[in-house]
Amino acid sequence: MSAIDTSNVPLTNRAKAHRVKWWREVGWRHCVGVVAVLYSIFPLVFAVNMALSPGKTGVPDASKLFQQVTGDQFVTLFTNNRPETQVHFLNWLANTVIVGIFTAIGTVLMGGAAAYAFSRFRYKGRRTTLTALLIIQMFPQMLAFVAVFLLLKSLGEVIPILGQDSLVALICVYLGGALGVNTFLMYGFFNTVPISLDEAAKIDGATHAQIFWGIILRLVAPVLAVVGLLSFISSFSEYIIAKLVLTTPTKWTVAVGLYSLVANDRYAAWGLFAAGALIAAIPVLALFLFLQRYIVSGLTAGAVKG
Amino acid sequence: MKRLVAVAVVALGLTAGLAACGGGDKSGSGGESTTSAEATEEATVSADDDNPAADPADADDGNPAAGSYDCSDASQIQGEITVWVDETRITALQPAADLFCAEQGVKVNLIQKVFDDLRKDFASQVAAGSGPDITVGANDWLGEFKTNGLVAPIDLSGVADQLSPAALGAFSSEGQAYGVPYGTENIALVRNNALISETKATTFDELIEEGKAVGQKYSVIIPMGDAGDAYHMYPIQSSFGAEVFETDAEGDYTDTLAMGGEAGHKFAEYLAKLGQEGVVKSTITGDILGQAFTAGEVPYVITGPWNTSTWVASGMDISVLPIPSAGGEPAAPFMGVQGFYLSAKAANAFDAETFLVDYLTRADVQLELYKLGGRMPANLEALADPSITDDPVAKGFAEAAGDAQVQPSIPAMNQVWSPWGLTEVAIADGKVTDPAAAWDEMITNIETAIAENAG
Amino acid sequence: MSELPLKPRTQKSRKAATMAVAGGWGPGFIVKLILMALIDAIGIFGVIQAWRAGSTTILVVAIILLLVVNYVYFARRAIPGKYLVPGMVFLLIFQVYVMLYTAYVSITNYGDQHMGSKDAAITAIQSQHTAVAPDKDPYAIVVLQKGTDYYLATVVDGEAEYGTSDQPLEALDGATITDGKITAVDGYDIVKPDRDNWDTLQTLAVPLSDDASQGFLMTERNGTQAKVYLPTVRYDKAADTFTDTETGLVYHDGGKGQFVDDAGKKMPGSVGWRAVIGFANYKTIFADTKMMVPLLKVLVWTICFAFLSVATTFFLGLILALVFNSPRIKGQKIYRTLMILPYAFPGFMTALLWKAMLNRDYGVINKWIFFGAEIDWLGNPWLARLSIILVNLWLGYPYMFLVCTGSLQSIPSEMMESARVDGAPPLRQFRSITLPLLFIAVAPLLISSFAFNFNNFNLIFMLTGGGPLPGTGSDTKIPGATDILISEVYRLAGVDLGTPDYGLATALSILIFVLVGAIAAFSFRQTRKLEEMA
């Protein structure tokens, strides 16, 4: 993309050439960008259309885009005013946010601590635990829903709060998978923090705990943000285990609740679903945009040098 | 080293203290492991505390006799039962639950479930030793529930003469009742009077012609969906004489399929034709049926009371008619019966049975359920109520029921539904070139599955 | 971010650090102490509860965990342990144990007809085979209680008689009979059935005489009347057999969770239970061609789906990243924010949204893009597969775009500079420098993306449910056209359609795990090689 010398060209031509050059180097990129953006958002436009359509059941006819606009779906969502579909949307949202936050915090702390141990200490069995972890994390918890169900059943008989229909139990199950993928992502990133920093601090008399909490965790903040975000999102979207653990409609998460609205053909409330989906997406979206700058560095830095 | 010991002592002291507090607080709910998970902890504790005091009073009263309890006062509540209902019935049951609590002092926890979850959740929960005391359900679940030992027999001999024998029979197996029926339902032909006000057709083919003459998007709709809907297709099938199972001398279903052979082939070919006509397609779900009907895009649909009640409520002018025969014999729909099952592992079987037998069979309770769901009450007194006999829609469904056959509840039925539905999808969508051969293949597969399961 | 928080540099904190090392009571230590006390309290509470509930396994596990946690946090050694234990505890209980338990379930016949325990099955068989004797009138009875034992008492020919399940009716002394009814009995209380004693009373079946075929009495809920019941089968506890009272046939435990006759045929009306059946489920998967062939197809599709998903998203993401990797574009941030919306939206919602959009009759895709054509996107096997790939492209390309952008920016500018000085044409530069570097950077992410899609249950379940299902007369265990392995497990488990077969489903889970584990171990080894080469 070497610069073309334009100084000798007459003025009109120069302006033209300038525009051509702009098009060749920048303008077309904007075109691509607009197309990509359209591609990304047109389903969301459709979702907004569904959410604002008046129908109680069924997929709103797409040819009637924004012909009838009403807030009925949103009203129902919050007031639960239809006898045929009971919607506990506020409960669902609150449950989901609670589960998401605790899962994210737990995952970040436990994953971070484990990654620190793997990255900074050399002890017997380190290699083995790492490999074992790598293998075990390949077993999706969802595949074990039968066993999870039976485990919670027997735990619940001893400690009710760890049994079925409890958000705590659901968080615990999610945290069971916390060490999995995340530890590897973090491990890679932890390795990028020079060990000389630790050693300097150690000479200064800092304990391992002080190094961990005071130095390392701050330096790896991007990856913590990424892991927290990813686990928040995945717990937000998780369906099977949540469905299995939470049996009372008021205790459901958004994923379970919204799915129930469209699961049955006879009375699939797509409009209600879309309205709920749009609202539920807001916390995720906000978090995502807020943490956006960390994501790229968090995802790649560990991978590059790990 | 000394320091470490000191630390340990302090820590242990603290833990012991905390444990004592924690243990004391929660011992009530923790020890009571049989209480279903749905019961709120608070209610469980209070029920436990108050039971001893309430016992003597109980004995004096003589049990099923009605007392008078204030259910807003937790100390007056003697016990509780858990009932699973779906969202369409929870409101209708609330008065019965309140009455039961006021008279028996037993709190009814109505737990709202999604209808599609009821069956599988009940099966998995009860098998694992928990679940509700009572669940609402359809009569064709009985086979599965019984072979898995999930439901307990109920002694309905005291109230049997108040209930429709057909409905009672649908919840019975080998002479024993396993559930309390409350409503029967069947599908019928529903006409949008705004599009066409008179139906002359006596055969299904004529009906389609009439529907086409209206000139809307569809002529007639029978809902199907991806997994098929043999239930809605059954009147067409039975009009060819291809009934699902053979019946024995007493009219009970046997394990032998009766829908194969010549009659089955004829139906299969007719189904392929319906598919070409656009009457049935896997993409036309119950969902789309509802939309098309309310939008005035179709004059005729085959559906049940769950839709008509909303349509009437929204002010549509509709008529409910018997389904014209397609194959010469009467088009008999299935009669589905809805009712309540008693869990074999009920935590409080005593009160649950009282609620089932003495309350849910009552005319006023069943009438309430009729008003919300549109299903014909199983209680004979309720069935004779003017609100039903004077209702043209209800009358229409009753007429359409005509020769309705009770939907089989034998275990073998479990092996039938899905292949049946899927094969119908394949035929209607034109995915198979030879409908009769596909039908035969289905019959063979089902027969194998039934044999495997019985062995 | 620039000021490094190297705390111990200051005088004060260095002092604190020194104290902590010397074993003082620093604030950190106090926090730890409080936390440990809390954890111990919860642990001990758990132990007590397990003891009360009589659950030995949970008791033992709770005690071991408690000891290990205390050792790790109070001992000087085991420093790595202090960081590993919290995660490991959850991992062991909710992942490792669950895996092992899954392996155990896979060698049982847990599923339809084999749901509960054997005891529950026997009770159910008994209660289901008890019929009211049609020609016998009910007896007027009272329920007697002495201590914790219950009796039924009745008046036969003017004399009071009583009995229990083990003892047929016999004469009862000390009964006061008024108007032919027992009103009081010396040494016994007359009680009413209630919610507390009902479970016991329901098992109280008093034989009318030594001849069991005469039937037995069971009280009704009012406690004043008992019907005569006749059992059609009799359970012999010692021999663990059922005998049909009419035919005399004997049924024994066939070892496969059912009572069977000598020929191995199931007892009519039997209720089964969960039993260990060895490797029968695995055998079904491998030996049954009805099972194996479709599963192999599913495997092929799973790999294709995962590979194509990664390839398409990466390709589109890379192109867009290259397009936007120019500082001269204004509004980059806005573009990026809008473009990553699909990724930020919770996945299950967008999958369902696309399902509605692809609806043949009302969906926006047919209405707008194909001008009302009735294309059956999710009903035709190949179109459904294509739809899934395209939807996944939409869902996944923003992630790849982010990743590629990040990697491009992290490529040292000196390398690009030197290539430019060498006069290499842009395409060459890209092929020989940018692409390899980029690839090394993102390879592990591509692998994990592959692994993620390999098990991308949500997308398949929400979009097509695995369908369209194969045509004729197939049973529900046969996979649909878009089923991937993990959704096929769900189908086999029969949670949504058909009859549950958890044994078979878990056996397949274990096989998938072995497969994925092997692929993962292999590919991670490959990436390590790739890095070493670089």
Image: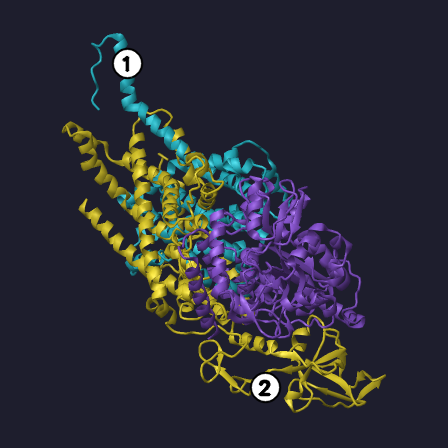
Chain colours: A cyan, B purple, C yellow
2 or 1: mark nearer the eye: 2
Q: Position of residue B448 (x, y in %)?
A: 44, 69
Q: Nearer the viewer, residue C238 or A283?
A: C238
Neighbour tally class for label 1: few under 14, some 14-19, many 20 plus, Cα within 10 Å = few
Q: Residue at x 32, y 23 (%)?
A: A27
| Circles 2, 1 touching at the beta carbon (< 8 Å) | no
Is residue C525 shown above or below A8?
below
Residue with the most extreme left position = C422
User: Tag 2's secondary structure?
Assistant: loop
Kindly identify the amino acid type of the residue bearing the numbered disc 2.
Glu
Label 2: which residue? Answer: C246
Q: Position of residue B162 (x, y in %)?
A: 74, 66
Q: Is residue C27 visible?
A: no
Q: Nearer the viewer, residue A45 or A266?
A: A266
Neighbour tally class for label 2: few under 14, some 14-19, many 20 plus, Cα within 10 Å = few
Q: Nearer the viewer, residue B191 or A227?
A: B191
Side of C51 relative to A294 (left or right): right
Q: Residue at x 26, y 42 (%)?
A: C441
Q: Quadrant of residue C280?
A: bottom left
Kindly identify the amino acid type of the residue bearing the numbered disc 1.
Lys
Give the position of the N terminus of chain A as an image quadrant: top left
Label 1: which residue? Answer: A16
Chain letter for mark 2: C
Q: How many marks?
A: 2
Chain letter for mark 1: A
Label 2 to label 1: alpha-carbon separation: 104 Å
